Amino acid sequence: MKRFLAFLLCVLLLLTLGGCDSAQEEQPITLTIWHVYGGQTDSPLNDLIAQFNQTVGKEHNITIQVTSVTNTNTIHEAVLSAANNDPGAAELPDMFISYPKTVLAMPDENILVDYRDYFSEQELSAFIPAFVEEGTIHGRLAILPVAKSTEILFINKTLFDRFAADTGATVDDLDTWEGLFATAARYTEWSGGKTFFVHDYHFNYFQVGVEALGESFFDEDGIAFGSAFAKAWQPYAEAALQGGVWLYDGYATEPLRTGDAVVSVASSASVLYYSDIVTYPDNTSEAVEYLARPCPIFEGGEKLVMQRGAGICTVRSTPEREKAAMVFLKWLTAPEQNVELVTRLGYMPVTQEAFDTYLPQAIERLENPKYRELYRAFLKTQEEYSFYTPPQREDYLSLETSFEAQVRLLLSAALKEYDGGEDLSAAASKALQDLQQYYGK
């Protein structure tokens, strides 16, 4: 009888434990996310999240719920407001898109998961090292790379071919900054005063260029203004003073859309906004073809290019919820899913395997010729260039903002004063002296 009662108690205990497991299985973990990829109703990431929820998520009792699709500035402000417990602030989601500047501005970055606690060294070694480096804040991997962009040279081939037919210019001339700026001056003369080149981020041209020439762009006080800066400045400023460089505010896509410029360096993600139809100031229009090539380099300089794009932060919660987030993020950054995401956005994948195996296959399936051009340029960039990681400085954003404004302002003023008769090199050097004086150098 005692043996029977013991057996019965064991059976009841097993049934009870099984019932608990069943109860747990009936209550899947739901995780929230804020992101920037698309709109609330038309988003490649939302589509992939739906795919995850129906497959791997369902197997693991995990549901990812998108609670906001907006822009990085809005998420930056909302995250800081929540982290500072501001009145009326929304509660932090389980995951959110972030740049390093957001994490650095948080009152306590330790509320974020360190991905090294959940990704093995072998798993992390699959990622492009520079992408992991950018997400490492104070020794902790707080931002997981998911989709990255870089800077790409975009060329209106239709307009460039007309110019080339008359002058003998070639696209290969644009492989170096020296060649590009010399071509810009030739184009302005050939076209009767039109601009040739527009750079979305003058600050990036200088900081990456100076670093590629073997010097530091920054010093303790801000910008160093060394000999490499002067070398980067001279051809750029001379072309600007001849009217070959666009100095107005706004994005590069706009002057290319109106035919006011022919060539740009811009974020690869801006491919979405390059119009296949150019509408000129006289209201005539024509269809155009685009080329995409890796960013120019300085003669004798390193092949270095800016990396851009945010990653995903995970907020600390419970071990179960954090592990559930890792299941999703490992799935999302696996080559197949990752390439599917980025090729719909104009971004780069984040692992070497994705670049080597999955991206070349995906390029052949792309219907839009602009995207095929872009991703071929990506492959060459990843193969030949090193990715530059901006420093994690508290004054980085303020330096970027003031520098962009001052460079455009000073060169625009110098352009109005320059009449073509004075020494071009001296006029460019004078503009550099004015810039240095503004920064107290």
Image: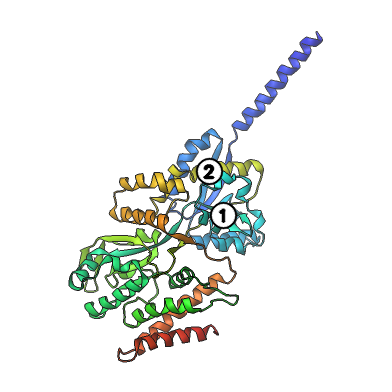
Q: Is residue 102 left or right of residue 296?
A: right
Q: Is residue 34 left or right of residue 301?
A: right
**Camera-side residue of 197 and 224:** 224
Cα separation, mark 1 vs mark 2, equals 13 Å
User: Which residue is drawn at the image coordinates 33% and 54% (left, top)?
Assistant: 371
Element marked by disc 2: helix
Q: Amino acid at mark 2?
A: Lys
On the rendered image, what quadrant is the C terminus found in?
bottom right
Q: Amino acid at mark 1?
A: Ile
- How many badges with numbers are in the image? 2
Q: Residues within 10 Å of mark 2 (few under 14, many from 20)?
A: some
Question: In the rendering, which numbered label is found on residue 374?
Answer: none
Q: Kindly tell me whether residue 125 is visible in this rendering.
A: yes
Element marked by disc 1: loop
State the image coordinates of residue 394 (x, y, percent, origin top left): 60, 69
Q: Residue furthest right?
A: 2
Q: Residue furthest left?
A: 166
Q: Residues within 10 Å of mark 1 (few under 14, many from 20)?
A: many
Q: Are marks 1 and 2 in contact (CB under 8 Å)?
A: no
| Residue that label 2 marks | 330
State the image coordinates of residue 154 (x, y, percent, origin top left): 33, 63
- From what the image shows, is residue 268 above or below residue 202? above
State the image coordinates of residue 141 (x, y, percent, origin top left): 60, 54
Q: Is residue 394 left or right of residue 386?
A: right
User: Which residue is drawn at the image coordinates 75% and 17% (left, top)?
Assistant: 9
| Residue that label 1 marks | 143
**Camera-side residue of 85 and 11:** 11
Q: Earlier in the sequence, mark 1 or mark 2?
A: 1
On the rendered image, what quadrant is the N terminus found in?
top right
